[in-house]
Amino acid sequence: MRAIEIIHPGAPEVLQLCERPMPVLKAGEVLIKVQAAGINRPDVLQRTGNYPVPPGASDIPGLEVAGEIIDGDLTGSGFNKGDLVCALVQGGGYAEYCAAPLAQCLPIPKGLSALEAASLPETFFTVYSNLFERAKLSGDETLLVQGGTSGIGVTAIQMARALGHRVFATAGSDEKCRASESLGAERGINYRTEDFAEVIKSCTGGKGVDVVLDMVAGDYVAREITCMADDGRLVIIALLGGATGTLDFGQILRRRLTVTGSTLRPRPVAFKQMVADKLRQRVWPLIEAGQIKPVIFQTFPLEQAAQAHTLMESSTHVGKIMLTVA
């Protein structure tokens, strides 16, 4: 099969088209004939040598795909060979065929194409597990999303808004702020020209937000602490601003704040199956009703994966960057 491999850590040009053997299925896996695959920040980190492949996972990049199930034991799953699904995988997505845990496969939501469905798994699993399982966002609580026009950001804004929450989002330009507002954010905050902590305090009557979803970390953490409500939760899911920062432990103690974080890729299949079940119950109906929509910025053919990564690193996109497989 054709696939994209990382010939050595480096710039996007190290992504090269190659021929690889077909995946060998493990117990509990199905073989998917890939129609489309998503590009995600962890793919970039893997390409640069900063995100090791988990033991037993494919070294081919790509964490989400959509396509046709063509092999595997489907007993009791409700799926049949020939069904179109989208799936979260540990690797191997940039290829014509990909092995996926059956437990991490979801039906393509009614009304969506395979391309649109392939844009869902990585961000939807990440957002749901962190906002609603880890941070316990509920009731009438409020949310701040750092990086509101990233793949994670457009998902978090729409999902939280559709489930009844006030959402605020940061972005790097006024244009991107308006884009985040068009997706459901109450206020887009230009982090280059505004202090997001001051804006949040102003918009919430001084209370602050209940949950912060943070992909930046670094020196953002200190400011995030100041704009969180009492009993607030900060969830860190990436370290684009650095792995170290300063914490005011006095505020954490006095106001009962929680600082936590997680990465999705190493989590066991059982955890991801739980998230898949919750997505199918709570979120897939919202997609099918049009309350949450895939946001795809640009697509590239598989052989242009390097160009797709160049676009990802430019941070000029709004939403997902995708690969299509002929």
Image (cartoon, helix red, strand yellow):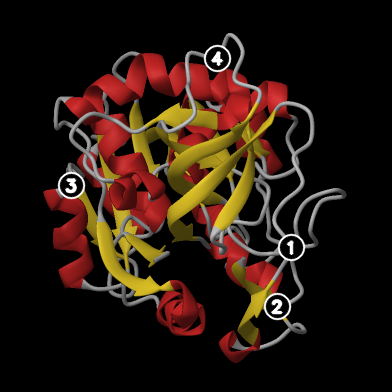
User: Residue 64 appears at what percent x and percent y?
Assistant: 52, 49
As displayed, is residue 217 above or below residue 4?
above
Q: Distance between the residues labelled 1 and 2?
A: 16 Å
Amino acid carrying mark 4 in the image: Ser
Mark 4 is surrounded, within 10 Å at the Cα level, by few (under 14), some (14 to 19) or many (20 or more) other residues, namely few
Label 3 crowding class (10 Å Cα cut-off): few <14, some 14-19, many 20+?
A: many
Nearer-the-camera pick, 123 or 308: 308
Name the residue located 29 percent from the left edge and 42 percent from the top edge: 157
Mark 4 vs 3, N-terminal side? 4
Name the amino acid type tagged 3: Leu
Residue labelled with disc 4: 77
Q: Position of residue 74 (x, y in %)?
A: 59, 20
Residue 252, above or below 145:
above
To which residue does mark 3 refer?
Answer: 183
Label 1, label 4: how far apart the Cα atoms are: 27 Å
What residue is at 70 percent from the left and 40 percent from the top? 249
In the image, 297 versus 325, the foreground residue is 325
SS for callout 3? loop
Q: Mark 1 or mark 2, which has the lower sequence index? A: 2
Of label 2 and label 4, which has the lower sequence position?
A: 2
Choose between 56 and 314: the one closer to the eye.
Answer: 56
Quadrant into which the C terminus falls: bottom left
Q: Nearer the viewer, mark 1 or mark 4?
A: 1
Q: Name the residue under label 1.
A: 21
Q: How far apart are marks 1 and 3 (CA)?
A: 41 Å
Q: What residue type is labelled 2?
A: Ile
Task: Tell me the number on the disc at residue 6.
Answer: 2
Query: Where's residue 238, x and y in %?
Result: 60, 55
